Amino acid sequence: MDEKKPIIRMYFVKIKETFVDLSEEEKMEFMHKDRENMDGLGMKQTMLIDCRWSNEEWDYIGIKEWPTLEALVKRAKFEKEEIETFRYVESKTYLGTLEIGKYGKK
């Protein structure tokens, strides 16, 4: 993997009842802390798709761009130890690098 390429993290999220049951103030506090961490690590939100109306398995599908693998390692630690994301969402993620326009070219 070319270390200079940003890391793309595609994710699928299903919101759990434990998040729904939080007060509006608790939800905003959680989301603010979460976003502050992502911004601090250099994340760029590329896409967030609300698919609650068309999909029973996932509420949101998103794509985020991260500057380095190190930033993602720090992010994973934050998600697990600081905000305990696993309590509030079910998720699946995939990592890769952006390769637009290279398929089939010499």
Image: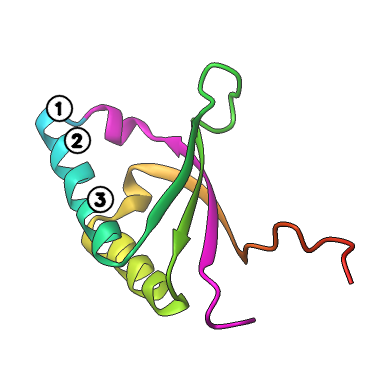
Q: Of the residues tagged 3 and 2, which is closer to the observer? A: 3
Q: Extreme top residue here?
A: 53
**Which image quarter holds the N terminus?**
bottom right
Residue drawn where x is 23% and y is 64% of the image = 40
As for residue 87 lying within the magenta part, the answer is no
Q: Which residue is the site of mark 1? A: 24
Quadrant of the image occupied by residue 101: bottom right
The residue lying at 53 percent from left, 16 percent from top is 53
Q: Specify the quadrant of the image occupied by residue 37.
A: bottom left
Cα distance, mark 2 to mark 1? 5 Å
Residue 27: image location, x then y, percent: 19, 35
Q: Residues within 10 Å of mark 2 (few under 14, many from 20)?
A: few
Q: Which residue is mark 2?
A: 27
User: Sequence order check: which comes first, mark 3 or mark 2?
Assistant: 2
Which residue ends up furthest to the front in the rendered image? 106
Residue for point 78% across, 63% down = 102
Residue ID for mark 3: 35
* Circle 3: element type: helix
CA neighbours of label 3 inside 10 A, class few (<14), some (14 to 19), many (20+): few
Magenta run includes residue 13: yes
C-alpha distance separating marks 3 and 1: 16 Å
- Magenta segment range? 1-21
Proximity of marks 2 and 1: CB atoms separated by less than 8 Å: yes
What percent of the width, then of the height, locates residue 43?
A: 37, 60
* Image quadrant in which you'd find residue 23: top left
**Amino acid type for the residue under numbered disc 3:** Arg
**Badge 1, how many Cα within 10 Å: few under 14, some, many 20+?**
few
Q: Is residue 29 above or below residue 53?
A: below
Residue 38 lies, with reference to residue 23, above or below; the image says: below
C-beta proximity under 8 Å, tags 3 and 1 = no
